[in-house]
Amino acid sequence: MRWRVCGPVCRKGFLVDLGLCEYEPSWRLQLKLVDLRSSSAIPDTLVLVEHEHVFTLGRRGSMDDIIEAKAPVFRVERGGGATYHGPGQLVGYPIMDLSGLGLGIKQYVRKLENVLVKTLQRFNVGACVREGYPGVWVGGRKIASIGVALRNWVAFHGFALNVKPDMSYFRSIKPCGMPPELMTSVEELLGSPPRMEDVKEALIEEFGAEFGLSLSPFPSDLLKAIAESVRL
């Protein structure tokens, strides 16, 4: 992968690409990384993953939002309601010290939206944001969801970009309280979606540019030790 230089002054950051991974161990990994970031043991870190089929419920979600439990359901700390994760969806978990960035939570969410909009524009998808509706939209349909949590001013959880997931799973839930037919994907819009690796590369570059980060792979020895501790 080639990553664009983010500007004249870049901070060091780490990148973790988990590939295809079940939800629970990646959630435990997030919590461990939050602890490490809170103690300044690691810099800001971006975790990328495609999950096995799973539904998650944020702080506003309830089991009433699950129409059919076609996959495991997890209740988590992030904001928002019910959502689906699965293969073909690029999920990002930025572990970011917002106090060091001088950002409030709304400013941070807007920057995540900027990253997603610019990433999609690279693939000729005219995405936008809608005031009062977190996430990224194409026309009246939602292509990316955002839900974050905060602990000691370290943000975790993050975003989910629908590249080419099995969209039928969204019909088993009320995604963030919305009708499931409002959800869309790059594949639905373009017919032939870009390769996931190309989307990852574009997103990594846009993320680095937006947050002034020069991302390098997470140290392998440290990642191995953490992975063993969380049974990744």
Image (spheres, rainbow, N blue to C red):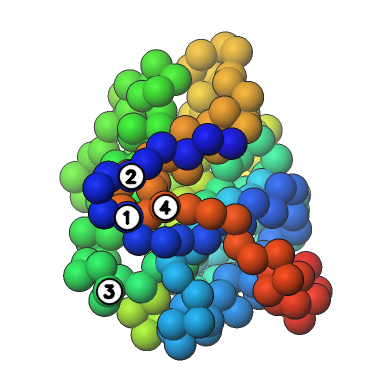
Q: Name the residue beneath numbered marker 2.
A: 6
Describe the element under mark 3 as helix, strand or loop: helix
The answer to whether the residues at label 4 and label 2 have Cβ atoms under 8 Å apart is yes
Q: Which residue is more in the foreground, 212 or 147? A: 212
Count of labels shown? 4
The secondary structure type at the circle numbered 2 is loop
Marked residue nearer the N-terminal end (1 or 3):
1
Amino acid bearing label 4? Ser
C-alpha distance separating marks 1 and 3: 14 Å
Which circle marks residue 10 in the picture? Answer: 1
Q: Is residue 97 left or right of residue 171?
A: left
Q: Nearer the viewer, residue 64 or 43?
A: 43
Q: Contact, CB < 8 Å: mark 1 with mark 2? A: yes
Across and down, in percent, residue 204 comes to 47, 43
Q: Position of residue 67 (x, y in %)?
A: 62, 51
Q: Which residue was labeled with disc 3?
A: 100
Relative horizontal placement of residue 44, taking residue 9 as reference (left or right): right
Q: Is residue 54 above or below residue 41?
A: above
Query: Which mark, by number, is residue 214?
Result: 4
**Which is more toward the observer, 171 or 128?**
128
Question: Separation of disc 1 and disc 4 at Cα?
Answer: 6 Å
Question: Which quadrant is the C terminus positioned in?
Answer: bottom right
Residue 187 visible to the viewer: yes
**Residue 23 versus residue 145 in the image, above or below:** below
Dot 2, how many residues are within 10 Å of its Cα: few (below 14), some (14-19), or many (20+)? some
Q: Residues within 10 Å of mark 3 (few under 14, many from 20)?
A: few
Going from N to C along the chain, the mark reached first, 3 or 4, is 3
Q: Identity of the amino acid at label 1? A: Cys
Q: Is residue 65 visible?
A: no
Q: Residues within 10 Å of mark 1 (few under 14, many from 20)?
A: some
Q: Secondary structure at mark 1?
A: loop
Dots 1, 4 in contact, CB < 8 A: yes
